[in-house]
Image (cartoon, helix red, strand yellow):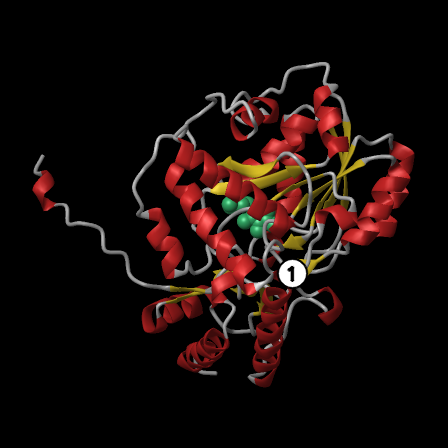
Amino acid sequence: MNTDSYAPLSPPRRVLLGPGPSPVPASVLAALGKPTLGHLDPHFLEIMNDVRSMLRAVMRTENEPTFPMSGTGSAGMETCIVNLVEPSDKVLVGVNGVFGQRLCEVARRAGAEVHSVEREWGRALDPEALLKKKKDGPFKLLCVVHAETSTGAVSDLGACKRVAEELGALLLVDCVTSLGGIPIDLDELGIDAAYSGTQKCLSCPPGLAPVSFSPRAISVVHERRTPVASWYLDLTLISNYWGEERAYHHTAPIQMIYGLHEALRLVLEEGLDNRHARHARNAGALWSGLEAIGLELAVPLQERLHPLTAVLVPDGIDEAQARRFLLEHHDLEIGGGLGPLKGKVWRIGLMGEGSRAENVELVLRGLEEALAAQGR
Ligand SMILES: *Cc1c(COP(=O)(O)O)cnc(C)c1O
């Protein structure tokens, strides 16, 4: 085989306004190219310490452990479930989109008896409906997705916490698309376990999953009767590497941790409040712009998520063709719908670095042209 025929990589430069990954700032890309260190190098251990403390600041928690798991957001989900769930434990999941469904599937595979409360896709979870499940308990865990990226709906975590208390359950929260985009304060809300991902509002490439466990959740992990079924995601083993002992477990993805270090540094430099305000401002401009060109939004205003907007595809428009038009003419990526929303919505992400006024203008202009190209 003639391997000389392979050209070096040269991926096009896209504007990523889909459901993730989001655009990555130049300084984060530069961090990924810094020299590799050994995973026990004293300098790398300092970098890990910084990442841990920056993550605690961004997640607004004092929790130990708070650190990134090696793997994407779904590895964070799996980490929370496999460490907290033992076979036959009862778990209650609020489901209003793809990621609630995935939580059910992961919990089922961990041996849990899974109960779910469905809500129409495009709406927030209904705390009353969750509470009505109390009769089927006792539940060990209540699992909710803060920001459903598959629909663009945001749920009320304060209300979910009150339900968890009524149920006597730990509260597990998916904050993959909320962290760095909309306010979430782990300690103030009393969240027991949370996971996120790097490629949504933190604007780092995909590859790490920050997780955080409260002291209450950690005591549940320590009281397990059975070993955690996943060796790779066993929090106790990994804590020995991220904690004081620095014991080898698996080789940390060094460059990804550099990238996250820089991404978190940028989040804190901007300030969480400023960043949330920026996401709110640009989402508001997008919503009015979409309505001004005659498009309808899928989620009611009160339940709408700033980092991700679902727009209804007008009758007679081929949604995939419109997305191809944006990619070809503007190097612009937006997302299509999933599950029951497949073919019915576009999903526009204004996440992290992507949340900018010029991107709002670009996607509005592009969509107008794409609609015109199909005779509208
Ligand atoms: C993206 C996402 C995930 C899964 O993350 P991956 O990085 O794709 O594994 C989980 N939950 C939500 C809400 C997400 O948006």
Residue 35 vs residue 1, the one in the foreground = 35
Left or right of 355 on screen, residue 34: left
Residue 165 appears in the rendering: yes
Q: Is residue 315 left or right of residue 15?
A: right
Neighbours of disc 1 within 10 Å: few (<14), some (14-19), many (20+): many
**Residue 121 placement, left or right of 261:** right
List x then y, in percent, for residue 189. Answer: 78, 49
Q: Where does residue 299 sit, x and y in percent of width and height?
A: 68, 66
* Quadrant in the rendering for residue 117: top right
Q: Is residue 56 above or below residue 300?
A: above
Residue 226, located in which quarter of the rendered image? Answer: top right
* Residue 47 vertical placement versus 128 (above, below): above
The three-letter code of the residue at mark 1 reads Ile
Q: Please tell me which residue lies in front, 210 or 319.
A: 210
- Vertical arrangement, residue 155 with respect to residue 142, above or below: below
Residue at x 70% of width, y 28% of height? 84
Q: Position of residue 354 (x, y in %)?
A: 48, 66
| Nearest to the observer: residue 207 or residue 54 | 54
Q: Residue at x 71, y 28 (%)?
A: 218
Whether residue 126 appears in this view of the structure is no
Instruction: Give the residue at x 43% y 82%.
Output: 372
| Image spot of residue 180 (x, y percent) | 59, 57
What secondary structure is marked by label 1? loop
Which quadrant of the rendered structure holds the N terminus? top left
Mark 1, residue position: 182
Q: Residue furthest bottom?
A: 292
Quarter of the figure with residue 217: top right
Asked if the residue at label 1 sits under 8 Å from ligand 1, the reply is: no
Q: Is residue 72 above or below residue 241?
A: below
Please tell me which residue is depicted at 88% across the width and 37% down the height of the picture: 167
Is 139 positioned to the left or the right of 51 in the image? right
